[in-house]
Structure formats: structure tokens, C-alpha cells
Image (tube, grey):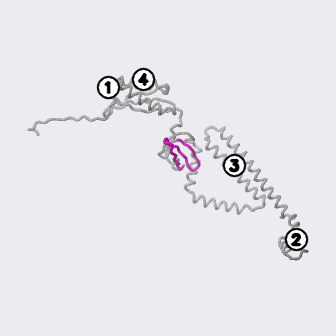
Amino acid sequence: RFAQYIAASTTPELADVGGMFDFAVEWAKSPEGGVQLAINFGLFLLTLLLFRVVSGVAARVVHQALRRMKGTSDLLRDFLSNVTRRVVFFLGLVVALSVLGVNITPFLAALGAAGFVIGFALQGTLSNFASGMMILIYRPYDLGEVVTVAGTTGTVAAMTLVSTTLKLPDNTRVVIPNNSIWGDVITNVTGQTTRRVDMIFGCGYGDDLQTAQRVLEDIVTQHPKVHAEPAPLVKVHALADSSVNFIVRPWTDTGDYWEVYWDVTRLVKERFDAEGLSIPYPQQDVHVHQVASGEA
């Protein structure tokens, strides 16, 4: 019919105009004609719109279900909900193409071949992707926590499946590949609500140990941000080269760690000076032996 329509439309005689119109009407009414194409295209758009709505609903259902599960992070919830939305919409696209009459078998074959080539070219990225998945599932840290990863300490500012962004104390940002993080030791500094502050203070060998211990105990027990339970620990720890060392280990809220550390350090210096206790520094004793000139 299409060939006849072309022949009629290119014939110079005016009498063929009616034939061209008849062929156009017949083509439009045929099973493969314009009306059917219009219907298929409408169904294509309707299918896409329907699956777009369904993908949004599915993503919200997954997000709400994960929120009710204990131990899931915001990162994992957002990732799985976004994956659900995209997978459902992709299925809708495949269904819509089939409704339009497109043979999707070559499309799927080409997509599989392209996926293989892309996966081979992006091996390092896929390794980071897999590490990001493990981090999301096991959740060794979350947004806003202070961690030490890949030899760098900072606050987790952002995370994707490929990398983690840390904000350092000097307000610089460091982007670390997830593969470097998951393959190394991960230390979550603020993962617990309380922390123990470990400090060592020394006094001179000639000082009274009871006085030094009483002063240290008074400082940590009277500090307003030191917890009563667990009780602070103050013990003689070592007989060092130049001093007798005490370990001082109070407990505090994680957010108050450095404030307690700095306050106690300053108070120890002030109280030791007031109590007449010395804070020794490394020193050496030099012994001089005199010998008679004849012996020399």
C-alpha cells in the first residue's frame, strides 16, 4: 500500500489526487496504519506515566519499611529507595516499548553487551561501588560522625557508593575512595555517647605521692563534666627516667572530650604549683670522678 501511495502522490495527473487520498485513508484504517500508531503511542505515554507513579510509590514504601527497621542508616534508606525507583521505571520503559510495537530483544542484547564493556572499563569504580555497599550495609559510621579512615581523621560530611567525603578540623574537605576505607582499619571516634579521657601526669621522685594522688583525684572528681560512673581512675603507672607517672582516666560525654582534656591539663599545672609539687622534665646526672695524677 505504501508503494501505491507513493506512486499516486508522485503522478502528475490531477485525477490521482483522489486516489492518493483514498490510499491515505485506507492506510490510516489498516491494522498497521496511522490510527493504530496513534493508539500505540498513547498507550506508550500512558504506560510511562503509570510506571512513574508506581516507581515513586514503591520507593516510598521501601523507605518507610527501612525506617521501621533498627540499625539502618539514612544513606542505606536513600540508596535503596532510589534504586527501587529507577528499577521500576526501567521495567516500565521496557513494557512501554513493547506496547509501542518495538522489538526489545535487540535492545536488551545491546544493553547487556554495553554493560559488560562498561563494567570491564570501570573495574576500579565497581570495586569502590562494592565497598560502598558494604559500608552502607554494615554501617561502621554515619553522617556527622568523627572517624579515622585511610589515615585521615575528620567528620563524615557526605557519602556516595564510590567515595566518602570528610571535613577536617581545619575546614578542608578530603574525598576518600570507599575501596581504601573498607580495606583498612575504621575507627569511629564518636560512635559511642561516652568516652574515656586517657592522660599521664608525672611528679618528681622527691614529691609526696599521696599528695600528688589526692590532687589529681580532686581535679577529676570535681570537674562538672566528668562522670561519677564509671568512676575516674588515678593510679601510679610507671617509674620513669625523670618522674613518677600517674595515669588519670576520667569518663565524659563524647562531645566534651577535648574540653575535659584541656581543663584537667591546665588545672594539674595550677594545683601542682600551689601544692609545691614538681613537674619534672628529662634530665641526666653527670658524675665526675677525680683521680690522682700519679694514677693517671
Q: Earlier in the sequence, mark 3 or mark 1?
A: 3
Q: Which mark is residue 69?
A: none
Q: To which residue does mark 3 refer?
A: 85
Image marks 3 and 1: residues in contact by CB distance under 8 Å: no
Gap between marks 3 and 1 measured at Cα: 71 Å
In this rendering, position of residue 103 left or right of residue 22: left
Residue at 43% x, 29% y: name it: 264
Name the secondary structure under disc 1: loop
In magenta segment, residue 80: no
Q: Residues within 10 Å of mark 2 (few under 14, many from 20)?
A: some
Q: Nearer the viewer, mark 3 or mark 2?
A: 2
Q: Earlier in the sequence, mark 2 or mark 4?
A: 2
User: Is residue 210 in sight in this rendering?
Assistant: no
In this rendering, position of residue 264 left or right of residue 14: left
Q: To which residue does mark 4 refer?
A: 218
Name the secondary structure under disc 4: helix
Gap between marks 4 and 1 measured at Cα: 17 Å
In magenta segment, residue 161: yes
**Residue that extends furthest to the bottom in the rendered view of this protein:** 12
Q: To which residue does mark 2 refer?
A: 20
Q: To which residue does mark 1 refer?
A: 207
Q: Residues within 10 Å of mark 4 (few under 14, many from 20)?
A: few
* Residue type beneath disc 1: Asp
* Residue type beneath disc 3: Arg
Q: Earlier in the sequence, mark 3 or mark 2?
A: 2
Stretch in magenta: 155-177
